[in-house]
Amino acid sequence: MRFTEEHEQLRRTVRDFVEKELNPHIDEWEREGAFPAHEVFKKAGRLGLLGVNKPEAYGGMGLDYSYQMCVTEELGNCRCGAIPMALGVQMDMSTPALARWGTDDLKREFLAPAIAGDVVTSIVVSEASGGSDVAAIKTTARKDGADYVINGSKMWITNAAQADWLCTLVTTSDGAAHANKTLVIIPTKLKGVEIGPKIDKLGMRASDTCPIFFDGVRVPQRHRIGEEGMGFMMQMVQFQEERLCGAIGALRGMDRLIEVTTQYCRERETFGQPLIANQVIHFRLAELKTEVEALRSLVYRAVEEYVGGADVTLLASMAKLKAGRLTREVSDSCLQYWGGMGFTWDNPASRAYRDNRLLSIGGGADEIMLGIICKLLGTLPGRKKK
Ligand SMILES: Cc1cc2nc3c(=O)[nH]c(=O)nc-3n(C[C@H](O)[C@H](O)[C@H](O)COP(=O)(O)OP(=O)(O)OC[C@H]3O[C@@H](n4cnc5c(N)ncnc54)[C@H](O)[C@@H]3O)c2cc1C
């Protein structure tokens, strides 16, 4: 991966945004369990950060995904996981399929305002009956005249409390599970859309997560992304950016936590010497940093191949799996070296410990990543026919 002055400039812009617009408010937003998404997204939109790799015709910068990677990596300087996740949903989860397969009209109506930061959006796939098995979703959209009529419910939806539109996976026919799904844009203002209540979570406190209920919601069929029945395939492609985003977003958070923990271990003395003087500690921190750099190399390689036009499902799944596991290891080890302080709520290691736990669950759990990796390696046993 070769970074140009344009990449570095973009990185500086994001770091500045994080330092000025996000970090001064994080403790308050985390305490309140909410952040002003429209205000924050507008500021990000004005800087062009919500459409770096989106087409210029809709307000994006038209750059390749390596630039988007820089944005996500630098958002990792934020002192919590919640706000980068909320922004990540808009940049890498709810808009890639729309940008790739949406009609011009649909992109003007929904993508352009998302890039400008005028709206907040969600990716709406998971259901209470099970999030891992995407093919088994039960929310339906039946045709009626020029509309779809949507019934069902979704669960665990990030940004939902403040969202203006939802990129939603629905079942549009009784056919085979992988060929009967469709992605539809559903504005939240429509009659029959009910959102909430907010779910009280272990981590990512400032980000809102809610169930969504659809009761006879009429959506024009022109809100469909691409062809009917192709939604499962599109969501699988869209997952590549979601999973890359998860892995990229973890990197700087881990760097930061190792840095602040190292600093703390320099200052904190036990038995007449700084904690850092203990080999078990400085070796462990060095080992963790080595692992982070190894993950960074895997992530950069996946992004480089993605930019080159390759299908990076294998590498993106590996990166997401490794990132989920490594963030848990880094935050657990770092928390240990803060001692009792690490067990207090606002400590950086404790916040990372809570926030990072999500990465092994959301956007496809570790076991789902392992299943995909095995499938692509040809080692997944076929299912026995009943
Ligand atoms: C804070 C938060 C935010 C989220 N945001 C969104 C969002 O914006 N949009 C959205 O659509 N979804 C979102 N999700 C949902 C998330 O993607 C799902 O929670 C995840 O896919 C797991 O689904 P589940 O919770 O139903 O767990 P289940 O599917 O019930 O699985 C439970 C556990 O079982 C194990 N497991 C499952 N299947 C297998 C298998 N085949 N082999 C071995 N082990 C297995 C895994 O360890 C898994 O964690 C969010 C979740 C959380 C917690």
Image: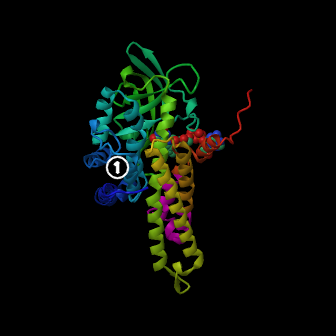
Res 194 quadrant in image:
top left
Residue 200, above or below 102: below
Q: Where is residue 200 in the image (x, y as percent from the top left)?
A: 47, 47
Relative side of 226 to 7, left or right = right
- Label 1 sits on what residue type? Phe
The residue identified by callout 1 is: 35
Residue at mark 1: C-beta within 8 A of ligand 1: no
Q: Where is residue 301 in the image (x, y as percent from the top left)?
A: 49, 52
> Which segment is the magenta one?
330-357
The residue at 37%/52% (across/down) is: 71
Judged from the image, the secondary structure of the residue bearing numbered disc 1 is loop
The residue at 48%/59% (across/down) is: 352
* The N terminus lies in quadrant: bottom left
The local crowd at label 1, few if under 14, some if 14 to 19, many if 20 or more residues have their Cα within 10 Å, is: many
Q: Where is residue 127 in the image (x, y as percent from the top left)?
A: 52, 34
Outermost residue on the bottom side: it is 272
Residue 365, above or below 103: below
Res 256 quadrant in image:
bottom left
Q: Where is residue 5 in the image (x, y as percent from the top left)?
A: 31, 58
* The C terminus lies in quadrant: top right
The answer to whether residue 270 of the structure is visible from this angle is: yes
Outermost residue on the left side: it is 46
The residue at 52%/57% (across/down) is: 295
The residue at 37%/45% (across/down) is: 64
- Magenta-drawn stretch contains 170: no
The answer to whether residue 31 of the structure is visible from this angle is: no
